Amino acid sequence: MKKRIISTLLLVILVFSLIPTVYASASNKTTSEIRKQITDTYSKALKASGRKTFNGYCAVYVRTQLSVLGIYSANSIGNGNKVYNHFKNINSTSSGYNVIKEPGANAINNLISKHGQPLYNIVVSYPRQAGATAAKPGAGHTLFIHAIINDTVYWSESSSFGKVAEGGVLTRSVKEFNSSYKKSNGDPLGAIYFTKDSEAEKNNTNTPKAEQVNYFPKYSGSTVSIVTALQSVGAGSSYDYRAKIAAANGISGYSGTAAQNTRMLNLLKAGTLVKP
């Protein structure tokens, strides 16, 4: 009898161990949590798909991420340049997400303008695959943005991107992100934003509260120096303090480069530079 009970328990444990993990919504997560979510989702997506790589299969990677995160499940969402059309007539998912479509080249900026920040769970569809032409666009391209926080985009790719390996955490300012794919993949066909109903989110006591975020005063001068701009708004400007500011705004590995300082200056001018 004991052997039969033990065998049954072992069978139950085995069955539950095979059930794929579904992650909670990204809503209100911190940048550190989003970074971890990206790397964890990549690992889970590989396991769920049975693949060793997603290189050359961007739509499969996007589809599997949506499934792993519990946002949307389907056997196929089409090639990269068909993804936007796949969701064109879908207004909600079975897991309770509203599906908001924003067409055209300015899709990301328009979503930010209409819905503010932070934003989570956005699929972007592009007309061309890398190396293709407008006349022969191939399968196109698609990607999944995990979050846009303080004008910084957090996502991963189905292949290596610059010096970042497949599935690694990628971050760019919104402006940099928008220009990153223009030459290789063309302007976006559109973006699909998955969001829970606002009232449902508000009434969900399990939803973690957003961190209190404090911003530097908006800088309205004309200097091109982040040091001068910080001093003008009454803030410290030492290298060590700028490194802390950079880290708080998703700028990793601060070394005082012109690009890093310009990015912080632009955030300061916009009134969205986060205090460390």
Image (cartoon, rainbow, N blue to C red):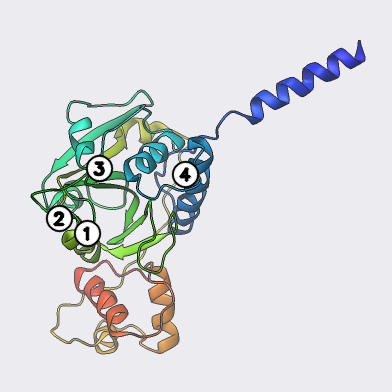
**N-terminal label among 1 and 2:** 1
- Which residue position is annotated with label 2? 186
Query: What amino acid is labelled 3 in the image?
Result: Gly
Residue sitting at x 19%, y 46%? 138
Where is residue 207, by image quadrant?
top left
Image quarter (top left, top right, bottom left or bottom right) of the C terminus: bottom left
Query: What amino acid is labelled 2 in the image?
Result: Gly
- Give the distance between the C-alpha atoms of the residues marked 3 and 4, in whole angstroms: 33 Å
Q: Nearer the viewer, residue 182 or 210?
A: 182
Mark 1 crowdedness (10 Å alpha carbons): few <14, some 14-19, many ≥20: some
Residue sitting at x 15%, y 42%? 102
Mark 4 crowdedness (10 Å alpha carbons): few <14, some 14-19, many ≥20: few
Q: Are marks 3 and 2 in contact (CB under 8 Å)?
A: no
Q: Are marks 1 and 3 in contact (CB under 8 Å)?
A: no
Residue 78 — which label? none
**N-terminal label among 1 and 3:** 3
Q: Are marks 2 and 4 in contact (CB under 8 Å)?
A: no
- Give the distance between the C-alpha atoms of the residues marked 1 and 4, in whole angstroms: 34 Å
Image quarter (top left, top right, bottom left or bottom right) of the N terminus: top right
Residue at disc 4, secondary structure:
loop
Q: Are marks 1 and 2 in contact (CB under 8 Å)?
A: yes
Query: What amino acid is labelled 1 in the image?
Result: Tyr
- Which residue position is annotated with label 1? 181
> Mark 3 or mark 4: which is in front?
3
- Which residue position is annotated with label 4? 208
**N-terminal label among 3 and 2:** 3
